[in-house]
Image (cartoon, rainbow, N blue to C red):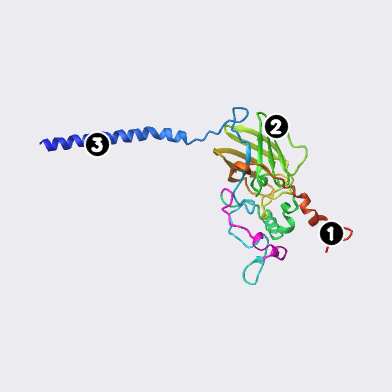
Amino acid sequence: MRTATALLMAACVLGCQALATTASMAAAKPVAAKSAVYRAPRGPDKIHPDLNGVWQTLSGANWDLEPHGARAALQMRPGPINPVPAKDVLALGAVGAVPAGVGAVVGGEIPYTPEAKKLRDENRADWIHRDPEIKCYLPGVPRANYMALPFQIFQSDGDILIAYEYAGAVRNLFLKDPGPAPVDSWMGQSVAKWEGDTLVVTVTGQLDSTWLDRAGNYHSADMRVVERWTPMGPGLLRYEAEITDPATFTRPWKIAMNLYKRQGEDAQLQQFKCVEFVEEMMYGQYRRQPLK
């Protein structure tokens, strides 16, 4: 009898402990969920997140926004069995090869109209002569944000400016809408506002001369880009952009990727004013005595 009573009391104690543990875990769940929401340090205005710093993506989006496998070159031609690098890029060897990438397009595929996709394919087949990056033209938005070179955000209590290492490109983000852009330009006009801790930037007025990547993806002058910059953790931004261009795409579509903040001695921009680097390629033929 005493043994049965002892066993009953032990079972009761264990059951009560289990219930207490379960209750404490249940009570802890809302706290854990709440603590998972990152709140970035406040910026100079003491209200909005501090986005100051040098940022860079580690994605391969500039090679090709869509998911892609590694391939021998950006520009290919038919071979005896499989496609081979085009003659104009053959000497680049492995330096000109394309690394594999998971892509940045939400859903995987850019929704071109049939006519626009044909032009994309023509661009890809003649990349060496058509990609504006090769001639050091300003990259436009969103491409400027995922090139191989970093950019720096300067944020004060009333102004935001983005400076890019590539070609010395800059963007002034208007926090008060000045109205339509007076003229189209390479980097367009950027109008920004805050939605909670997310900086939302609408970009319009871009020239149709920029591309979206090295794979021939392009747009028209009617393109409208809505960017979303959201702090996700210390030194981590989530970058999203919705692209609308009825002349080129059947519907609006999005890209998304992470941006990482450079630290230490790497947290500075260098100069890459590449205009002078391409002068010989573009104008050398006009020398009085062209080089041989």
- Element at label 2: loop
Where residue 251 sits in the image (x, y, percent)? 62, 46
What separation in Å lies between label 1 and label 3 (alpha carbons)?
89 Å
Say whether disc 2 or disc 1 marks the residue closer to the N-terminus. 2
Q: Which residue is mark 2?
A: 177
Amino acid type at image mark 3: Leu
Which segment is the magenta one?
85-106
Contact flag, marks 1 and 3 (Cβ < 8 Å): no
Where residue 70 sits in the image (x, y, percent)? 59, 60
| Badge 3 density bin: few <14, some 14–19, many ≥20, Cα 10 Å | few
As displayed, is residue 80 above or below residue 178?
Answer: below
Amino acid type at image mark 2: Asp
Name the residue at the bottom extreme.
80
Identify the mark at residue 51; answer none if there is no mark.
none
- Element at label 1: helix
- Placement of the N terminus among the 4 image quadrants: top left
Say whether disc 1 or disc 3 marks the residue closer to the N-terminus. 3
Relative horizontal placement of residue 177, taking residue 228 as reference (left or right): right
Where residue 159 sits in the image (x, y, percent)? 68, 31
Name the residue at the front extreme.
265
